[in-house]
Amino acid sequence: MTIDDLLNQPLTSVADDGFSAHVMGRVRAGERRNLFAVAAAAVLCTVLALLFVPVQRIGADLNLALIQIAQSAAVSVAVAAVILTLLFEREFVRS
């Protein structure tokens, strides 16, 4: 009997007894813990930033930046290109 013959034979079945479900449950629980840790870190960083950064100045700077972006011809052309692309895709590609 050659190695090819041995490799071509089907393997005998192994009783799972819920092992796969248990492992997947542990993986999902670990993913939930990781997601919670990332969310908690994001909230903590946001709270710390709000404590030490002047919020009124950020609002004024953001307002100024948004006005400048709205008046930019390059941004207007880019937004028009995106809108036309989406309309073209909806009309011709998906129909």
Image: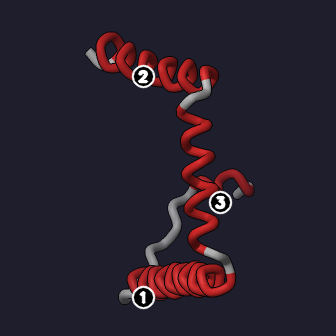
What's the mark number on residue 6?
3
Q: Identify the secondary structure beneath mark 3.
A: helix
Q: Position of residue 62 (x, y in %)?
A: 59, 54
Which residue lies at the image location 57% right of the left edge and 23% below the top edge?
A: 78
Mark 3 or mark 1, which is nearer to you? 1
Q: Is residue 15 visible?
A: no
Amino acid under label 2?
Ile
Q: Earlier in the sequence, mark 3 or mark 1?
A: 3
Residue 92 to residue 29: above or below: above
What's the mark number on residue 83?
2
Q: Position of residue 13 (x, y in %)?
A: 44, 74
In the depicted view, which residue is nearer to us: 86 or 22?
86
3D distance between C-alphas at marks 3 and 2: 60 Å
Could you tell me if the residues under marks 3 and 2 are in contact, i.e. CB atoms within 8 Å?
Answer: no
Residue 26 to residue 78: above or below: below
Amino acid under label 1?
His
Which residue lies at the image location 63% right of the left edge and 66% below the top edge?
A: 57
Q: Position of residue 1 (x, y in %)?
A: 70, 58
Residue 34 to residue 79: above or below: below
Q: Position of residue 14 (x, y in %)?
A: 45, 80
Query: Could you classify mark 1 by the number of other residues whose Cα lies within 10 Å: few (under 14), some (14-19), or many (20 or more)?
Result: few
Q: Identify the secondary structure beneath mark 2.
A: helix
Q: Earlier in the sequence, mark 3 or mark 2?
A: 3
Left or right of 1: which side holds 15? left
Q: Identify the secondary structure beneath mark 1.
A: helix
The residue singled out by tag 1 in the image is 22
Name the quadrant of the C terminus: top left
Q: Earlier in the sequence, mark 1 or mark 2?
A: 1
